[in-house]
Amino acid sequence: MTGYLSTLGINAGEGRVGRILREVHQPYNILRCQGARNLNPIPYHAEYMGHKLHMDQNEKLGMFGVTHVLAVDGFSSKIVANVTMPVKNNLVIYDEVYRAAVASNGMWDQIRVDHGREFFLSLYVQEKLSQHRFNTNRLPYKQTTSSKDNNTKYCVSNLTCQVSQIGLERAVQSWNAHRIPGRGIPNMLAAGGCPQRISMELLPSDAEAARMYEDELGASLTWVSAFGTDPFSSEEDRQQAEQVFLQDYPDITVLFDRAVNNDPSLFQDALLCLINATNRFA
């Protein structure tokens, strides 16, 4: 919360914010107190910004067709890239997470991911560009062990992705602006970027990287992922349905604000509106 306030230009002490939250958000505070903090028994170490890049996904909303993927620098703890998509997809993760992170910050010595297939394209390009890293003695990456109506599924995923992205962006900005005890503020720790920068020309586009991957390794990737089936036969039909929805719900930020404060009714109404509009024009 202090990080979120900082992104709005408001500087408030953690003690003061904590006292206020305990008063105005008692249900959340009680749940937080009851939950045991997960502690890692193995001390973590990253020597500098650009040493380790951790990429992982959150699929808690997977059944609704929403998946978040984040990339975090191990030294600064800054979230350097993120994306929200209906289904995990190699091309989207490479383009909007790995490629975006490297283009903005430089090359990381090592990428850390689990054994999911969704990171194959990112790992492939990381290995292809491994000679451009700051410390080439390290391994370029490590993998750790690790409804039936298509129209309705499509609408649920579409709206939930957009609404949850609002929360994810707020969380990312807040995290990067908050102070980690004994470490500092991620935005400030990562201000200089990675020691090694590379030209954007070295980073292939998602389509180019996918073709290179398939040609060199003889493997196949899912180029487009969808949750449900796109019901629209033309772009004009899609735009008409969106226009009907926007007439009633011009600002979906309100849907997020109400939902996270234990009032999902407006989001539910908006979802029904979108489903009806989609069925009308599909």
Image (spheres, grey):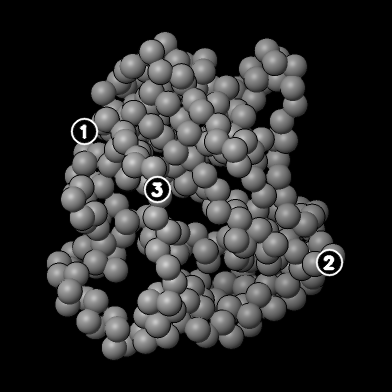
User: Which residue is at a point 46% across and 16% down the rendered structure image?
Assistant: 129
Tag 3, which secondary structure? loop
Of the two numbered discs 3 and 2 on the same chain, state the one appearing first in sequence. 3
Of the two numbered discs 2 and 1 on the same chain, state the one appearing first in sequence. 2
User: Which residue is at a point 29% across and 65% down the rendered structure image?
Assistant: 4
Tag 2, which secondary structure? loop
Identify the residue at the far front of this view. Answer: 41
Question: In the image, which is nearer the foreground, mark 1 or mark 3?
Answer: 3
In the displayed structure image, the side of residue 79 where residue 87 appears, left or right: right
Mark 3 Cα shell of 10 Å, populated few (<14), some (14-19), many (≥20): few
User: Which residue is at a point 21% across and 63% down the rendered structure image?
Assistant: 6
Q: Nearer the viewer, residue 246 or 275?
A: 275
Q: Marks 2 and 1, Cα distance to the nearest angstrom?
A: 49 Å
- Name the residue beneath numbered marker 3: 41
Give amino acid for label 2: Asp
- Name the residue beneath numbered marker 1: 192
Q: Marks 1 and 3, Cα distance to the nearest angstrom?
A: 30 Å
